[in-house]
Amino acid sequence: DAYYLDNRSNSRANVFKYVAKVMMQQPDGGSMIATASVAGIRSGAGDMVYSSSKAAVISMCKTMANQLTGTNIRVNAICPGLIETGMTKMVFDMADARGTRGKIGQLNPLLRYGVPDEIASAVLFLASDDSSYVNGQEFAVCGGLTSSLPVANRKKAVQM
């Protein structure tokens, strides 16, 4: 597992380095976006190797954002929460078999899971000029999961 983690991190670092060299030759800079995970922000969303590798991606983005000072190249990490994809298919299949799909995502304030289009929209924002002042950030798209420790049986808000 340690070799796997080290290999994944080193491979990503090399990709960052070579992409940055190409982007530095562009007069207008640009945006580098890496895929991390909420597992890299908080524990409990993946095993040690997965979570550590995602935390490494976040750290690489922050470090590269600073190393590219003055180049107009922005570097950010997109950190999805529970999204219905091939990677999470087993979770959804098991919930379907038990008839509990409606409970998936209940630990975040939106009380639901995400879909790939929501991640794509966040990536488009980070790639666009609308995010021209966003740099070196971990951009969580998680329904609010990272805003708090997970709370079971969260009560819906009442009129304030």
Image (spheres, rainbow, N blue to C red):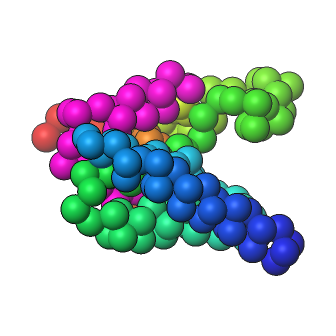
Please tell me which residue is depicted at 56% across the width and 56% down the height of the picture: 18
49 sits left or right of 60 in the view: right
Image location (x, y in percent) of residue 120: 48, 27
148, above or below 109, in the image: below
Q: Residue at x 76, y 30 (%)?
A: 86
| Res. 153 in view | no
Q: Is residue 90 above or below residue 77?
A: above
Give whichever of 114, 139 is nearer the camera. Answer: 139
Q: Is residue 44 magenta?
A: no
Q: Position of residue 15 (x, y in %)?
A: 61, 55
- Image coordinates of residue 118 in percent, x first then y, are 46, 27
In the displayed orientation, state which residue is furthest to the front: 25
Q: Quadrant of the C terminus?
A: top left
Count of picture labels: 0
Above or below 119: residue 22 = below
Depth order, front residue of 44/135:
135
Residues shaded magenta: 115-140
Residue found 69% across the figure and 30% down from its top: 85
Q: Residue furthest bottom?
A: 2
Residue sitting nearer the eye, 15 or 43: 15
Res 32 visible: yes
Q: Quadrant of residue 103?
A: top right
Position of 68 with respect to 36 (left or right) is left
Can you give x and y, in whole percent of width and height, for residue 83 in the image? 60, 34
Image quadrant where one finds the N terminus? bottom right
Q: Nearer the viewer, residue 105 or 56?
A: 56
127 in magenta: yes
Residue at point 60% right, 65% down? 13
